[in-house]
Amino acid sequence: MHKETTAANAEATGLGPSRRIILWDTLLDGRFSRGEIRFVLAHEVGHLARDHIVKGIAWYALFAIPGAFLIAVGTRRRGGMAQPAAVPLGLFILVALQLVASPLQNVISRHIEAEADWMALQTTRDPEGGRALFRHFSTVALQQPDPPTWAYILFDSHPTIAQRIAMIEAWESRYATSAAQSP
């Protein structure tokens, strides 16, 4: 990916035996520590362990099926989507539906990403690696740690850097409390 971008990223992909984790070479170019890379890898394993790809497809279908119905109903007077004259109206309805659904889709995506972050904390037990990673993301990826609420609602598919660091602090509190209580 270094020929395409300097952005550091990784992704979980595939279903069944084709499931894979892809680490971009930009994540491995020396800018990130071993702890940060382990945290990213654990985050992606969390996506696979929690079946987030299947859940994402199911959520997509939950939006796409009624959306297709609304497009069909909306273009019916113009002969339906089989008629070229109805295509611009169908595209307009699609864009309008996407704009309306985007905040809800972002809520779902942020929940999934937060769950993968929690899985990374549970797996690595390295809150410092996670904290360093998220702080690093704010400088390397130029992410705002706490963007304006309207931008967060409309555009952000991941928790904010501030939310991710707060999750790490909550995890540390829980882990420190349970460790102190054990004999």
Image (cartoon, grey):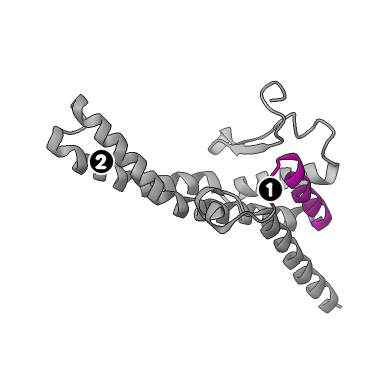
In the picture, the quarter occupied by the N terminus is: top right
| Percent position of residue 2, x then y | 72, 24
Where is residue 31, by image quadrant?
A: top right
Is 11 positioned to the left or the right of 57 in the image? right
Q: Would you say residue 181 sits in the magenta stretch?
A: no
- Foreground of the two, 168 or 91: 91
Q: Would you say residue 131 sits in the magenta stretch?
A: yes
| Percent position of residue 154, x then y | 50, 51
Q: Residue at x 13, y 38 (%)?
A: 77
| Percent position of residue 144, x then y | 68, 50
Residue 43 circle label? 1
How crowded pointer 1 is (Cα within 10 Å; few <14, some 14-19, many 20+) is rated as: many
Q: Secondary structure at mark 2?
A: helix
Is 169 positioned to the left or the right of 163 in the image? right
In the picture, the quarter occupied by the C terminus is: bottom right
Is 87 positioned to the left or the right of 34 in the image? left
Q: Residue at x 66, y 44 (%)?
A: 44
Residue at image mark 2: 71
The residues colored magenta run 125-144
Q: Residue at x 21, y 42 (%)?
A: 74
| Percent position of residue 80, x then y | 18, 34
